[in-house]
C-alpha cells in the first residue's frame, strides 16, 4: 500500500490554539517522525487584523528555537487579509516577491508555495500566475488550494507539462474532489477539513471550540451524525477499534484512492496523540484491507 502523507495544519493557531499549545503540538508531531506542515498568510481567519500572518510567525519562531533537522512547509499565498473576504493578489510580481520572502523565512524547510483562494476565471491571468510560480520555485508540481474555477485552470495549462497537488475539502459530510474533475488527469489530492470544521458526535460545543468559532451550523449535520455514530457502534461491536468520528474520518480519507495526504488540525495534545496512533495503525494494517466492512457501511450513509 502506498504510504500517505500526514500534514499538520495551522488554521486555528492564534484562534482556538494558542502559541504554547501550538508549540506542544508541533513538538509531538515532529517527534513522531512527521515533517509536513501546512500554513497560510491568512491563518487564523479570525477577522482580527492583528493576527494576519500569525500562524506563520509561530511556525518560524518554533523553527528558530527548536532548530529541526528537516521540515516540508507548504506555504499558501494570495489572501491579503484574514477577514474571510476573497480579496487576494496572485499577480506574477506578488508571487515572485512572496517566494523570495518565504525562502528567506523558512530556508531549506520550505517545500512549496501554494496558490490560495483564487476566484479568477481568466485562463490567461491564471497561466501568468502559474508560470511565475514555476519560475520562482523551480518546483516540478504546483500546489493549489481553494480554487473556484478548475476548468479555467485546465484551459490555462493546455500545452504545459505540469502537474498539481490540490488541497480539497473532503470529509464524512462533503467532498470537493469531484469538482476538480477537469484537472483529475494531472492531479493528486490532499484532504483537509476531515472533521468538518470541528463537528463531532457530541451535541454540546464549548464557546471556544472550532465549530463555534467558525460559526458552523451544527444542526444541519445532526441526522448524518446519528447515522455515522451507528457505524462507529457497529465497528466497536465487531472489535475493529474504530471508536470516534475522528477515526472514522481518517479511515475514509486514507481509503480514498486519489487522496495522497491528509491535513489534520488537532485542537490539543490528546487529539494529536489519538490521531497519530490511529493513522499509524491505518498505515500498518491498510484501510481497505482491514476496515473494508466499515467503509462499505459508510457508503450507505446518506
Image (cartoon, rainbow, N blue to C red):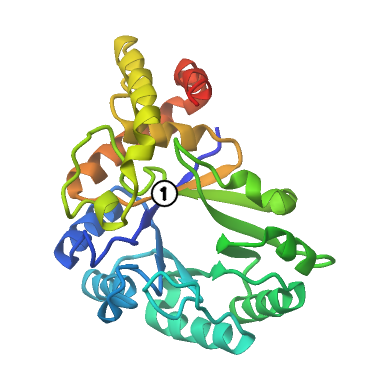
Quadrant where the N terminus is found in the figure: top right
Q: Is residue 22 left or right of residue 40?
A: left
Which residue lies under the disc numbered 1?
Answer: 193
The x, y position of residue 288, in whole percent, is 52, 24
Residue at 30% x, 68% y is 46
Q: Is 190 on the left-hand or right-hand side of 188?
A: left
What is the x, y in percent for residue 50?
A: 26, 81
Asked which quadrant contains residue 52, the reply is: bottom left
Counting every numbered tag in the picture gives 1
Rendering quarter of residue 18: bottom left
Q: Position of residue 123 (x, y in %)?
A: 75, 72
Q: Identify the residue at horizontal 53%, vertical 42% (top origin).
A: 175
Classify mark 1: helix, strand or loop: loop
250 vs 146, left or right, is: left
As drawn, the residue found furthest toward the top would be 238
* Image position, residue 160 (x, y; %): 80, 67
Q: Is residue 280 above or below residue 50?
A: above
Q: Quick one: 42 or 289, which is closer to the camera?
A: 42
On screen, residue 118 above or below 27 = below
Q: Which of 71 and 234 lies nearest the eye of the viewer?
A: 234
Q: Residue at x 45, y 72 (%)?
A: 85
Q: Residue furthest right?
A: 159
Is residue 298 positioned above or below 37 on the image?
A: above
**Which residue sits at x=18%, y=43%?**
270
Q: Is residue 300 left or right of residue 138?
A: left
Mark 1 crowd level (few <14, some 14–19, many ≥20, 10 Å Cα)? many
Q: Which of the two residues, 141 or 265, is positioned nearer the viewer here?
A: 265
Q: Which quadrant would residue 233 be assigned to in this image? A: top left
Amino acid at each position: 500500500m502506498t504510504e500517505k502523507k500526514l500534514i499538520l495544519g495551522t488554521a486555528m493557531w492564534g484562534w482556538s490554539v494558542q502559541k504554547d499549545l501550538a508549540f506542544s503540538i508541533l513538538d509531538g508531531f515532529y517527534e513522531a517522525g512527521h515533517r509536513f506542515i501546512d500554513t497560510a498568510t491568512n491563518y487564523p481567519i479570525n477577522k482580527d487584523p492583528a493576527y494576519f500572518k500569525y500562524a506563520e510567525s509561530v511556525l518560524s519562531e518554533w523553527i528558530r528555537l527548536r532548530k529541526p533537522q528537516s521540515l516540508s512547509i507548504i506555504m499558501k499565498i494570495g489572501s491579503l487579509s484574514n477577514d474571510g473576504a476573497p480579496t487576494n493578489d496572485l499577480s506574477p510580481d506578488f508571487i515572485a516577491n512572496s517566494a523570495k520572502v518565504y525562502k528567506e523565512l523558512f530556508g531549506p524547510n520550505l517545500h512549496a508555495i501554494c496558490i490560495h483562494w483564487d476566484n479568477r476565471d481568466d485562463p490567461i491571468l491564471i497561466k501568468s500566475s502559474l508560470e511565475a510560480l514555476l519560475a520562482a520555485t523551480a518546483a516540478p508540481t504546483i500546489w493549489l488550494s481553494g480554487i473556484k474555477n478548475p476548468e479555467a485552470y485546465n484551459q490555462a495549462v493546455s500545452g504545459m507539462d505540469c502537474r498539481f497537488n490540490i488541497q480539497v475539502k473532503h470529509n464524512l459530510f462533503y467532498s470537493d474532489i469531484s469538482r476538480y474533475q477537469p484537472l483529475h488527469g494531472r492531479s493528486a489530492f490532499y484532504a483537509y477539513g476531515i472533521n468538518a470544521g470541528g463537528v463531532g458526535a457530541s451535541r454540546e460545543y464549548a464557546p471556544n471550540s472550532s465549530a463555534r468559532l467558525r460559526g458552523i451550523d451544527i444542526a444541519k449535520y445532526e441526522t448524518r451524525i446519528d447515522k455515522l455514530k451507528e457505524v462507529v457502534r457497529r465497528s466497536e461491536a465487531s472489535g475493529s477499534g474504530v471508536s470516534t468520528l475522528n477515526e472514522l474520518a481518517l479511515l475514509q480519507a486514507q481509503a480514498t484512492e486519489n487522496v495522497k495526504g491528509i491535513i489534520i488540525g488537532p485542537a490539543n495534545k490528546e487529539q494529536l496523540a489519538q490521531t497519530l496512533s490511529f493513522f499509524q495503525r491505518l498505515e500498518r494494517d491498510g484501510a481497505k484491507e482491514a476496515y473494508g466492512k466499515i467503509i462499505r457501511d459508510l457508503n450507505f450513509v446518506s
